[in-house]
Image (cartoon, helix red, strand yellow):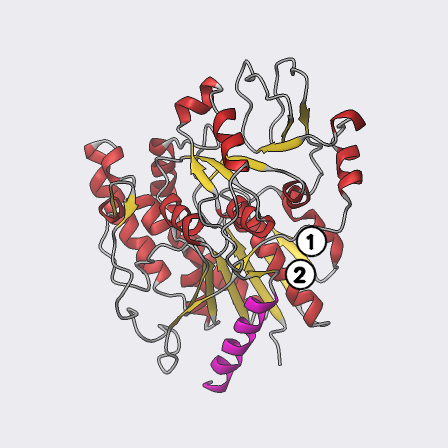
Amino acid sequence: MSPSHIAYYISSHGYGHATRAIQLCHSFLRAYDGIQITVVSQASSHIFLPLLNASDRVNLRPVNIDSAVIQPTPYSLDVDKTVRNLLDLSKDDVVKQEEDWLKGHDVDLVLVDAPFAPCIAASRAGVLSFLITNFSFAEVFSYFTSMVEPDLQPLLSQAVDEVVKGYSHADIWLRLPGWLPNPGFLPATLPSSTWVSDEALTVSTDGTITPEYSLSRPNFQRKIIDTPLITRPATTTSRADLLKMLGIPPFLQSHKILLLLLPLPDPPPQIPSDWVCVVAGSTPTMLLPDRYFIAPGDIHIPDVMEISSCVMAKLGYGTVSEVLAADVPLVYIPRRQFVEEYGLRHLVETFSGYENRAERLEIEEFEKGYWWWMVTELASREKSGELAGLVDDGDAIRRIVVEQWDNWKSLA
């Protein structure tokens, strides 16, 4: 058997939550003809258009389910505004709204990536819920404690406690690679700033799952299940077709490609003679020098990664998973205010077959345009020769979900 109606709650922060969730939705649609999926998210609707266009069994419900994380640039946060958004979130209203909706629409499975309030709503509605993520917003928000004004710190601490309690209502955590301990499942002490020492994670990742049993079905034991890396796969589009789409003329098509997934500094740095640079995700306002190209907004980024010699980007799950799947070197810009980075940094440093192929470039060097030396050096490194780590297009995780859903139903 399979669920008949899935509600998939997806955070509106960034693209990584949405892109990996979409892959899992496609897997369910491929496997089960009668299944219905309602995507619940305030992320930009254009992200979901390919999924919505692929099947009339998917609906988008754009309602408020989490608080906004404010990012002035791809690698910086407005901590004060982000914290105030959390404090202003009417959690009880969101929970009641979603509990009523779940009960009224015959939803029999809830997937969450990764707002906390839907976990409470699913528990109160008696519906099995999976948290599918590498991090939770409990550790994200608690990381800000020392960054906010002293009068906000006790309010933030109280709000984080509520977030942790919310995640404790989730029945199963499907733990994606690059994970951090989730205090709703593991006894990790907050604030999460204490988890980091000398730019490395030092927090214990052991401990008994707490609470041990589901809050809505006390005979169901809560679980943490590690999963493969889920990511958007590349298509079969040829290199020649991609170069044409990118507007790279024939006399430059043998050059190495740097894929830049960050705003281009002004003025752009001088480019080495045997390279071209493709800028994606932003539109530079300055006149571009020779051998800089703008990627069309609708181009499939994993395809461009497949033909690139190096990628430069921030560390986010979506980019990291796609870089690892493409097996392309990565120069990354740190996000100093975002604790998720430490789990992802560990992932790129330890992923089988990818060792020594990612390097950190400081923000100041990036903004000054002093980075081609690192790009060229990294692209010249030899691969380790180790077998590449496992990458999933959604099918492996879907099978785990259905197996656990069957277990849940057997205990009813």
As displayed, is residue 316 above or below residue 231?
Answer: above
Q: Position of residue 146 (x, y in %)?
A: 23, 36
- Residue marked by disc 2: 26
Residue at the spot x=62%, y=81% of the render? 1
Residue 273 shown left or right of residue 377 in the figure: right
Boundaries of the magenta span? 395-411
Q: Position of residue 174 (x, y in %)?
A: 45, 65
* Quarter of the figure with residue 255: top right
As drawn, the label of residue 51 is 1
As displayed, is residue 216 above or below residue 377?
Answer: below
Residue 386 shown left or right of residue 252 in the figure: left
Q: Is residue 280 visible?
A: no
Secondary structure mainly formed by the magenta segment: helix
Q: Position of residue 288 (x, y in %)?
A: 65, 16
Marks 2 and 1: in contact by CB < 8 Å?
A: yes
Front residue of 294/109: it is 294
* Quarter of the figure with residue 258: top right
Instruction: Check disc 2 and report its element: helix, strand or loop.
Output: helix
